[in-house]
């Protein structure tokens, strides 16, 4: 049985999650999966591959920009993710995330909850003991 990679919390009018990973990249990947797990009620097929690249002045800003970019892809290109493969590095002025995302056309799935936006409320990205933890609140 696979260990759960994210946890949900009750939060007024929003949904808060924590996503975990042995690496920073895995914690970000699991954050994306947590967000889309809120929206879809079944597994999404990895039929389409896209490249992604975002920057952030710090890790929280990078997480925010990454999740917002995924919402933008859903809204503008009807793209629903199922998997990610990311690399994160610290540049001279900002953190940089790039990689591939895999997914399918959203119309092939029933969206049970519409995530409108990501918020900075209670957001953090930090290493706790031997794993990375990302926490975010989704405006639904």
Image: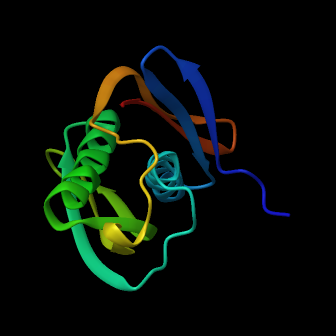
> Which quadrant would the C terminus be assigned to in this image?
top left
Q: Residue furthest right?
A: 1
Q: Is residue 90 visible?
A: no
Which quadrant of the structure image shows residue 119?
A: top left
Q: What residue is rendered at 78% in x and 55% in y?
A: 3
Q: What residue is rendered at 86% in x and 64% in y?
A: 1
Residue 73 in the image, given as x and y percentages of width and height = 21, 60
Q: Residue furthest bottom?
A: 47
Q: What residue is rendered at 47% in x and 14% in y?
A: 12
Number of marks drawn: 0
Q: What residue is rendered at 43% in x and 66% in y?
A: 109
Residue 21 relative to residue 90: left or right: right
Colouring style: rainbow
Residue 47 in the image, given as x and y percentages of width and height = 40, 85
User: Height in image: 24 above or below 42?
Assistant: above
Judging depth in this view, the residue of 58 and 92 nearest the camera is 58
Residue 19 in the image, given as x and y percentages of width and height = 56, 43
User: Height in image: 23 above or below 124?
Assistant: below
Which quadrant of the structure image shows residue 48?
A: bottom left
Residue 98 relative to residue 123: left or right: left
Q: Residue furthest top?
A: 12
User: Height in image: 80 above or below 67?
Assistant: below
User: Height in image: 110 above or below 17?
Assistant: below
Q: Is residue 21 visible?
A: yes
Residue 103 relative to residue 24: left or right: left
Residue 7 in the image, given as x and y percentages of width and height = 64, 37
């Amino acid at each position: 049985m696979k260990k759960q990679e994210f946890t949900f919390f009750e939060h007024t009018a929003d949904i808060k999650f924590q996503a975990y990973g042995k690496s920073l990249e895995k914690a970000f990947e699991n954050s994306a999966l947590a967000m889309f797990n809120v929206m879809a009620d079944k597994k999404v097929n990895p039929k389409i591959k896209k490249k992604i690249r975002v920057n952030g002045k710090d890790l929280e800003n990078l997480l925010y920009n990454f999740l917002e970019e995924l919402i933008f892809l859903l809204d503008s290109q009807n793209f629903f993710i199922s998997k990610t493969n990311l690399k994160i590095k610290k540049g001279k002025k900002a953190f940089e995330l790039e990689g591939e995302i895999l997914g399918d056309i959203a119309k092939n799935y029933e969206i049970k909850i519409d995530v409108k936006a990501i918020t900075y409320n209670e957001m953090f990205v930090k290493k706790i003991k031997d794993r990375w933890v990302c926490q975010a609140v989704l405006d639904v």
